[in-house]
Image (cartoon, rainbow, N blue to C red):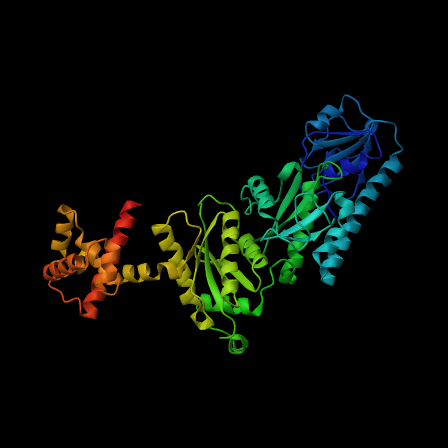
Amino acid sequence: MKLNADIIYDSLSKQYNAVIGGPVVKEMTLGRPEFYMEDSTAFTAGHLYLATVEHLPHRPSIQRGAVLVCIGENAYLKYYRDRMTVIVIRNKADFFKAYHALQEIFDRYDEWERNLYRNLIDGADFDTFLADSKDIFRNPLFVLDRSFRSIAVTEENPDWLSLKGESLDPVSLNKYMNSFAMMTEKKGAFRISPDGNDTIFVNLFDKEGQYEGCLCVMAKEEPFAAGTEKLAEVLAEMLENAASRNPDMIQDEQSSVKGLMMTLMNELPISQAQRMLLGASNNKVPYLAVCLRFSSQSSQIPSGYICDMFEETFADSCAFPMDNGIAGFIAVQDGRQMEQTENKLEDFVSGLYLQAGISNEFTDLFDIRIHYSQAESALENGDLLNPGKNVCRFSDYALAEMIINSLGGMPAEAYFPAGFKEVLKHDAVSGVSYLETLKVFLEENMSFSSAAKRLYVHRSTLIDRVERIEKELKLDLSDPDQRLLLNMLIKAIELEKSLRSQ
């Protein structure tokens, strides 16, 4: 296994009084040590040389990337330090023992590399990769999937990560994301300190370059040694190779029903196996469709994490990213469970800075896209008509949605019958509102007695007022089609006023 000067120095300094100096190359390019031969005047890049100071030439040719381990020191070493990495063993040391110590360093890392390749060939899980690496890093190791769930750990009770198989709680996630700063596209190792813990992260990607999770090394047992980042990159590459051979190691397992729902939502052809599953499960379980979106555009919480938390929070549920939101589906059994689900959803969205729209209940999975559209509509109408409301039910906004769609993009005024504008002109200058009178009268199913009570007027006064309204409108209120038109116009006017006031 190729190493770099930092890794060699870290191990060598545990046996000798050593110092390192000169330009350090971070790439792992160094092979096993070789004796410096006195008849040579060149130090070649990628080579690790061992020499005693008295045998070094005064002005040799030095390539960048060459490394020298020197026993003893003198003034001539400044020339070397200006051009290459120099590790000086200060105290008196046996040349061949130092050579043997360097060989042991390479032996150790070669054995680690062999174990990693054996695990890769054997199809070992991530826990095995981490267990075989803990002595190399001498600190706790974790692997998070793309939903920020710990899927492999080397200790059972980490400080700021959840236990294996669990997602981070929202508080921990916010701490993580504040430090992580959405660096899910970053290549190579980098350091941040979530909750004060110095931690090295290396993102994991699939073959298409999509973010799949990350390897974490936390400086809990001892501070990081120089070169740890490069070793973490080696381990991360092995984990990526293992995941490419067996994607289930890092990807969330999707149930058959969830896969079917995703296929239907994306309007893709269903397979024969999915068709059989649909026939076996369709029209048996009632579902609610939920559309989730961030209430703040600045939220950094990943959608994969929200999907994972949604499925943990609601039994018999599934969730996946969809367009500019998240599609969730919850199985409900009865009305009491429906109320409990809505209450739990209120807590869920408020904790994650989300808004949710809920569809009507449905059982036919072929209609899944229609009911998700209901949830989207509820969310959009709720945002327009009741800003700040976290959970919006389609049933509360169905009439508003139908009326808005029925207008066909034209203002309500375009549908006014003859005389309707005269009613509005009357209301503008009179203390008596004909429109309010008409609205209440229609809502009370044209009952003069009931409408008079709501309007606080005498019955005969209301009869006279309705006759004048009918004359002004040139409509017959006994005609159900004309009553429907008036009801829809009144509702459309109210919606337009509400939107203008936002």
Judge by depth and name the residue closer to the eye, 129 or 96. 129
Is residue 79 found left or right of 329 in the rendered image?
A: right
Q: Residue 498: x, y in percent?
A: 29, 49
Is residue 350 found left or right of 240 in the rendered image?
A: left
Judge by depth and name the residue closer to the eye, 254 or 479. 479
Q: Residue 35: x, y in percent?
A: 82, 38
Judge by depth and name the residue closer to the eye, 160 or 411. 411
Quadrant in which the C terminus is drawn: top left
Residue in the image at 69% along x and 50% along y: 235
Compared with 240, 98 (above or below) is above
Compared with 279, 433 (above or below) is above
Is residue 133 found left or right of 205 in the rendered image?
A: right
How many callouts does the rendering have?
A: 0
Q: Residue 115: x, y in percent?
A: 77, 54
Judge by depth and name the residue closer to the eye, 385 or 189. 385
Confirm whether residue 352 shows in the render. Answer: no
Compared with 190, 212 (above or below) is below
Residue in the image at 18% along x and 69% along y: 478
Confirm whether residue 457 shows in the render. Answer: yes
Within the image, what quadrant is residue 194 found in?
top right
Residue in the image at 46% along x and 73% along y: 364
